[in-house]
Amino acid sequence: MSHAAADWTRGEPGLAYQECRACGQRWTFARRFCPACGATEVETRAASGRGTVHALTTVARAPSAALRPHAPYTILLVDAAEGYRLMAHGEGDLAIGDPVTAHFAPFGEGLIPVFRKDVP
Amino acid sequence: MSWITGVGLTPFGRLEGRSTLDLMSEAATEALASAGLERRAIDGVICGYSTTLPHLMLSTVFCEHFGLAPAYAHAVQLGGATGFAMVMLAHLLVGAGAAERILVVAGENRLTGQSRDSAVQTLAQVGHPVYEVPLGPTIPAYYGLVASRYVHEHGAPPEDLAELAVLMRANAARHPGAHLREPVTAAEVLASKPIATPLRLLDCCPVSDGGAAVVVARDPGRGGVRITGAAQAHTHQHVSAAPSLTRFGAGDSSARALAQAGRTLGEIGYAGIYDSFTITLAILLEEIGLAPRGGAGRLAREGHFAPGGPMPLNTHGGLLSYGHCGVGGAMAHLAEAWRQMRGEAGDRQGRVPAVALLHGDGGVLSSHVSLVLEQAA
């Protein structure tokens, strides 16, 4: 499993996903094998950062005192253009189905992906 | 075949000064009395977990405290589905001959045993530690995501979901042990403070102290209720990895439990359905087939789920109003179903049901357990 692609979960401004070389399955949570077929030929790839809003919620009540100053903030599930789904933040007025693109911003103790609506 | 021969249920709410072990003991004492059993008659113990008493061996901590020396004991962890998973396990164990009479017990001082921040943070940790938790989600946020998709796909107005909160509160008003008994209107639900859109405060269950216990036995004892079907389904853990946000494992799990019992949905006379949020209850009712897609709230408004209606639902008030103390939360649904089936539900008693369906979920609609209960033939 290579770490060639930058990823926000390691403090880098990028979105990585994994793809199985055997069956083509794509997924978000990194692991050393394919969760669909079990093959160990897994490639870590850089995503484009483009996607579509699948679900969204605006959190008014943050889980900790450290995050409370950030509230309200919007959490999204995004269907990435590459065919996998991820959780991220959203910015601006968003609705399910909106095309969005990621940038990266500090939040809490790290850097997180934040999606904005694409300007047509 | 197994029988539920006794139940114990403490009041839920703010129970100052009671520990996890106190609450487990109170519920266990009542369950044993209800079954007419002495401690020595119990040869198996299954317990859940407690966030205020995290321990590697909670079952034997409890046994030592309560004065039991069973031949079989351990804890089970499956989030909100734990209560019914424990009962299913006890059902299988007595069927297999591993024990004769199993005490299934849960309790937690989830409200007074920790700060609210601590409770919210502990629960939020069911999210993925790397890919979700750093984004600051909460349990209501995970369910808010699901609710946004529900509203999008089914077009159900928020007033409809609010009806489920109204019904649970109306039911709780008839139960002296309920945490929240003040009636609410749909307008009040819709005007309550936002927590994680579209969910508002009154769409969410409270955090409570409480305990619950049941005895699952091979023999009917003095008027038990039979468990005739039990099934589970597990499709994911984290909401980011859910195969769908509108179809979960509830339909699969409940269909298999009903098939095992040789029953159909049309024969169900009482429903005890997990209701951590109004959206949870709506999705489960609809997926199980007790309401059309997008129609659970509308049916609630029409009185379909009222105690005197065609499908009485969580007549004790559910998690939304009887309260939620963790593992004991869903066991209260079972205690109430048992009382309804024995005609012992007092002011809340509807037509005595011959067959009841119970369904619990854990995680973010991740883990499902369904039970079918029946009167003695």
Image (cartoon, coloured by chain):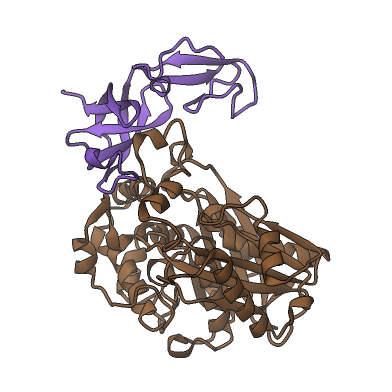
Chain colours: A purple, B brown
Residue furthest front in the image: B17
Question: How many numbered dots are placed on residues in this image?
Answer: 0
* Observer-nearest of B116 and B267: B116
Residue at 50% across, 20% down: A18
**Considering the image in quadrants, where does the N terminus of chain B appear?**
bottom right
Residue B146 lies, in percent from the top left, at 37, 47
Query: In the displayed structure, would residue B164 be above or below residue A44?
Result: below
> Which image quadrant for residue B337?
bottom right
* Observer-nearest of B175 and A80: B175
Residue A78 lies, in percent from the top left, at 34, 32
Residue at 71% across, 57% down: B74
Residue furthest right in the image: B97
Query: In the displayed structure, would residue B374 be above or below residue B343?
Result: above
Residue B357 appears in the rendering: no
Residue furthest top in the image: A4
Residue B306 lies, in percent from the top left, at 38, 78
Residue B234 lies, in percent from the top left, at 58, 47
**Considering the image in quadrants, where does the C terminus of chain B appear?**
bottom right
Query: In the displayed structure, would residue B352 be above or below residue A94?
Result: below
Question: With B150 as the anchor, is B10 left or right in this view?
Answer: right
Residue B242 appears in the rendering: yes
Question: With B47 as the anchor, is B127 left or right in this view?
Answer: left
Question: With B109 as the anchor, is B174 left or right in this view?
Answer: left
Residue at 56% across, 24% down: A31
* Observer-nearest of B65 and A9: B65
